Amino acid sequence: MSELKPKGTTAVNIAHSIEELIRNGSWPEGHRLPTVRLLAAELNVNPNTVSAAYKQLRHAGIIETDGRRGSFVPHTTEILHTETATPPNLIDLASGNIDPNLLPRLDQHTFAHYQLANDVGNHGDHPELIRFIENWLQNNTGIQTETMLLSSSLEIIERALTQRCMPGAKILVESPCWLPLPALLAHLRLEAVPMEMDEEGAVIPAHLSPDHISAVILTARAHSPTGICYSKNRWQQWQQWLSRHNPLLIIDDHWAALSRKPFHGMEGFTNEWIYSTSTSKFLGTDARIAIAASNGPTLRAMKKRFSLGPRWISKLLQHITLHLWQQLDSDGLANIAESYQSRRDSLISHLKQHGIHVPGSTGEGQHIWLPVPNESQIIQFLAAKGWAVQSGASFNFGKKPAVRITIGNLTLADCKTLADDIAETLAVNGKAIY
């Protein structure tokens, strides 16, 4: 038999042989696999053995099957990097960064009583930080379940989906959505099913049943990029819709510590859920720790897998996070929230004076989502005015054109100037926004 053909007499051996042919490039992207019967005849094995091998490869996302077209090697998904390089002469409203002036400062007291550890057996979560977090969760969200510390909200989502969902599974996501999600889902070979957003949150798709969905990702407050916060009515609609089946619900509440909007609680959800929040919005990316809480087995499985790989989050990082979070207290967090909210409200108000409607205008967060007639023209015109904004194409699966404006580097004094420049840009473009 040719070296470019699979070998083996068991499903495991055949699957491994095919995987090796794909990995070394012998079977390139788009290569059609032999039919089950043909390969079974060539290997002198039962067709059920080949069928089982193909099933293993399909579940691992190594091959895909498309009805009568048969099985083939899928095309590699290009990983879209979400970092934005902004020219130094432009005010950066594109990168999505928070305001560095609002971050707490490290001082000598942060490290005064910290002893660097030398015992690899003394790992795990910082007990005082866990107590602080669990108390914070109970007081601010009503959640009193098992928790876990990870490095980022995106890691929580990635680990939850990897643990729970098979390649090819359908995942409901908001549209527009958080920028890294489409690339993550594509890399995991999961099918993103976009949901339209209105002023109350994601609209439940009428054409889908929960039993066709493996997971749902919702942003409770300060939806990125629109700023929309879920209404109590929409929250209850989701509770009712999900109660009929058991897809995994992932709640991204990244703005929780800065939010002024109510959190509608998890007690009404009867399906399995994972709640996620992070310290990055008020402590910055260097002191970022993400917190996951859950009512089901997926989080426990995530913990077991984490214990076999990374094993723990740096105790020094946990110590810094606890110190800075306690240092901020409720007044410090309220001041940060007020700074972002005042700039967001001011820009929206000035845009409204020009007759420009902003979706999620009553929301919160660090972004504004502005539908426009032509993304590239708007971006170019605003760049000529000295502003860098982000194209919306990567957020909404290439649907309605829009731009994302991040207010982290926008001063309150500049809000009117930016609104005037946006209005002029739209007028030059010669079309009304919608």
Image: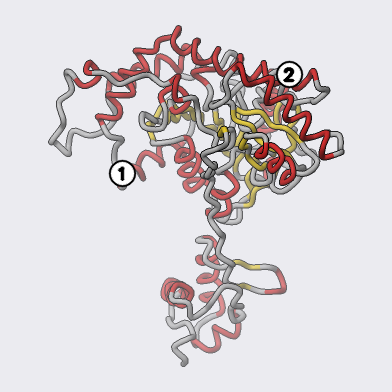
View extreme (bottom): residue: 1
| Residue 303 drawn at (x, y percent) | 37, 38
Q: Is residue 17 left or right of residue 179?
A: left
Instruction: Tell which of 143 and 321 is nearer to you.
Output: 321
Q: Say what secondary structure mark 1 lies in.
A: loop
In the image, is residue 3 above or below residue 402? Answer: below
User: Residue at (62%, 28%) from the top-left corner?
Assistant: 367
- Residue 133 image position (x, y, % from top left): 39, 19
Type of amino acid under label 2 = His
- In the rendered structure, are the residues bearing label 2 and label 1 in contact, judged by CB atoms less than 8 Å apart? no
Which residue is nearer to you in this view: 275 or 297? Answer: 275
For the residues marked 2 and 1, what is the alpha-carbon distance in whole angstroms?
A: 48 Å
- Give the crowd class for mark 1: few <14, some 14-19, many >=20 residues within 10 Å: few
Compared with residue 429, is residue 409 higher up or lower down, i.e. above or below?
Answer: above
Tell me if residue 165 can be seen. Answer: yes
Disc 1 marks which amino acid?
Pro
Q: Quadrant of the C terminus?
A: top right
The relative height of residue 393 versus residue 405 in the rendered view (above or below) is below
Which color scheme does this rendered protein use? secondary structure
Left or right placement of residue 259 versus residue 149 in this view: right
- Residue lying at the far right in this picture: please name it: 431
Residue 431: give x, y in percent of width and height: 86, 38
Report whether 328 appears left or right of 109.
right
Residue ID for mark 2: 350
Which mark identifies residue 310?
Answer: 1
User: Residue shown at 55%/12% (left/top)?
Assistant: 338
Extreme residue in the top direction? 331
Q: Where 60 sits versus 83, above or below? A: below
Q: Secondary structure at mark 2?
A: helix
Looking at the image, tell me whether mark 2 or mark 1 is earlier in sequence order. Answer: 1
- Residue at image location 50% in from the left, 61% down from the top: 60
Count neighbours of disc 2 (C-alpha within 10 A) and say few if under 14, some if 14 to 19, many if 20 or more.
Answer: some
